[in-house]
Structures are given as C-alpha cells and as structure tokens.
Amino acid sequence: MTVPVEQLKWMYKTMYKSRHYEETLYQAYFEGKLPGFDLAAGPIPGEMHLSAGQEPAAVGICAHLREEDIVNSPHRPHHHAIAKGVDLNRMTAEIYGKITGLGKGKGGHMHLFDPAVKFSCGGIVGAGLPQAVGAALSSKMKKKDWVTVVFIGEGAVNSGAFHESLNMAALWKLPLVVVIEDNNYGISVSKAASTSVASNAERAVAYGIPGVLVKDNDPIEMYHASQEAIERAKRGEGPTIIEIETYRYLGHFVGDTDEYRDPNELQKNREKDPIPLMKAHLLQEGVASEVEIAEMEGEARQLVHQAFDFARNSADPALETALEDVFN
C-alpha cells in the first residue's frame, strides 16, 4: 500500500507544526519561573507535559479520521489535538488560562475539550479508556460509522481500566482503536521494570482481537496499521490495539531532571528524529521539493505564532466567574 501524496504532505506539515508548537510552548512556559523554577509562577502555571518526538503516533492515525470520529487523549495531548484539528488559537488560550480558551481557561493543558472535532483529554492515567468505550458504544447504538480512537501510554496498560475496557469492547465488537504510545517510561519507571511482555500488542490475543506493533516511530507504518484498524472498526469487527515504539525527548514534565535516563539513550533517539527522516523521504520520493517543504514549514510556523499572539492578547476570566461551569 502506498500513502497518497497529499496525505504524506499533511503528515509532514502536521508533525512539523506540532513540534514547533511545543518548542514555542516550552519557551513560553519558563517565563517568570526562573532562576529557581517556581512551578506556580509565570503566565502558564502548573505542570506541563510535552510530546516532542511522539508525533508519528498522532498523524499516522488522524490522517484517516473524519471530523465526526472521536479522539480521547491522556495528559500528553498536544500532538493528538493538533492532528485532530482542534482550534489552535482556543487551545493555546486555554493553556494560558484565558477566557477565549476551549474551557474558558479553567481546564488547562491536560483538560482540552473541543466538541467541534470531537476531541477530549484528561489527566488521570488510564481514565480515558472507559470513556472511549462509552463513546464507541454510543456510535454503535446510534448505528453510526463513527470510530473512536483512544491514546494511552504504555504505563496505562497495567491499569485495571485497560483490561475492563478491552474485554467489554471486544465482547461487544465496538468501533474502537487503542493506540499505545510506548515511550519506554511511565514517569521515571522503565517499561522493562514494569511490564511482563515485550510488546503490549501481544495482550490483544487475550481479548481475541488484533494487536499490531509499529516499530521505530515510523509514521508511514503507523498510517498503514491505522488504516486496517479503522476499516475493521467500520465493518463492525471490533477493536484493535496498535502499539507504536516512540520516544519523548523531554522529561515526563517540563522541569523533570530526567536523571533516570542514560544521556546516550536520548542522543541515539534524537538521531532518529521522525521529522527530518520524513522530510528526507518526501524529497527522495519526489513527493515535495525543498521549496514546497519550506512553504509548508512557514505556514505551520505562522499558525503557531498567531495562536500564541491570540492567547497572550486574550483577556483573563473575571474573578466572579470562578465557580461557574464547575461542579459545586
């Protein structure tokens, strides 16, 4: 199977936009926090989890999704949100805690919700799985061909919610695709120290469903694996597990000292950065010229800069609205 030219271009541009977005966010996040790194200070207080290096997981499957398909993401959500088409201005405003944000500035970066493109995320590890099963069940009961995709990390697979959710989804043949982003670390604990199988795709056999392992953080292989899983879901044949070997270049959160990783391990993975590799593929295959790629990158940077300008120039929520839109 070949990937259509326009899809390849979209995948590269979206990965590039996601990376540039997070590099910009990384710099913005440190404003007012140094020299002592005060987590609560600056225009973006609180924790921040970035996904630089994990972009192939998002673009490989979102390239197949429609607006009506559903995506649920965990606490490291920006690459998924960008690939699903979440409003970049309102997403950035939400991260800044502004009234123009997706949740009026009350959710922050781990609680992004955009019903226009059916995207949501949450900060509790593994909690998105039951929600995704509910969404997939809703699609089936409404006799819609909507597909639900839930992204989780390899650490979340060891939670009880994973077994309960997969058992039910398989039993009822729900249109669900579970994407496991194996970045090899659950916070600071390596996969080897926490998981009894080499690949979580092997766990699929326990539920009588397919399990696919995508090696080497490859966006094109992720595209092909996702195509098969989505077509299976639409045919009413039930869920699929896809595990992709990926890697986060930064710590679990921004400010993490990252002492649990060997610097050589990080360097080796940076040498396999999927974005320059994808660019080289586009050039080698004649999919795009240097000029076209430069134009795509320029457009992506412009959209990112517009989003940050929009967020910074937006108003803060009024103090008297603090208890609105929340459970009391």
Image (spheres, rainbow, N blue to C red):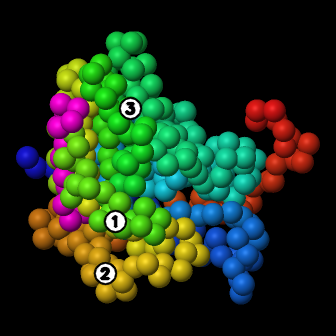
Q: Which residue is mark 1?
A: 193
Tell me residue 72's x, y (percent).
45, 40
Q: Nearer the viewer, mark 3 or mark 2?
A: 3
Q: Nearer the N terminus, badge 1 or badge 3?
A: 3
Residue 147 in the image: above or below residue 36: above
**Image disc number at residue 265:** 2
The residue pinned by badge 3 equals 164
In-front residue for pair 269/8 = 269
Is 303 displayed left or right of 201 in the figure? right
Amino acid at pointer 3: Glu
The amino acid type found where label 1 is placed reads: Ala
Q: Residues within 10 Å of mark 1 (few under 14, many from 20)?
A: few
Specify few, some or many for label 2: CA neighbours under 10 Å numbering under 14, 14-19, or 20 or more. Answer: few
Residue 265 quadrant: bottom left
Q: Badge 3: how crowded within 10 Å, few (<14), some, or many (20+)? A: few
**CA distance for labels 3 and 2:** 34 Å
Magenta-drawn segment: 205-217
Residue 315 in the image: above or below residue 271 = above
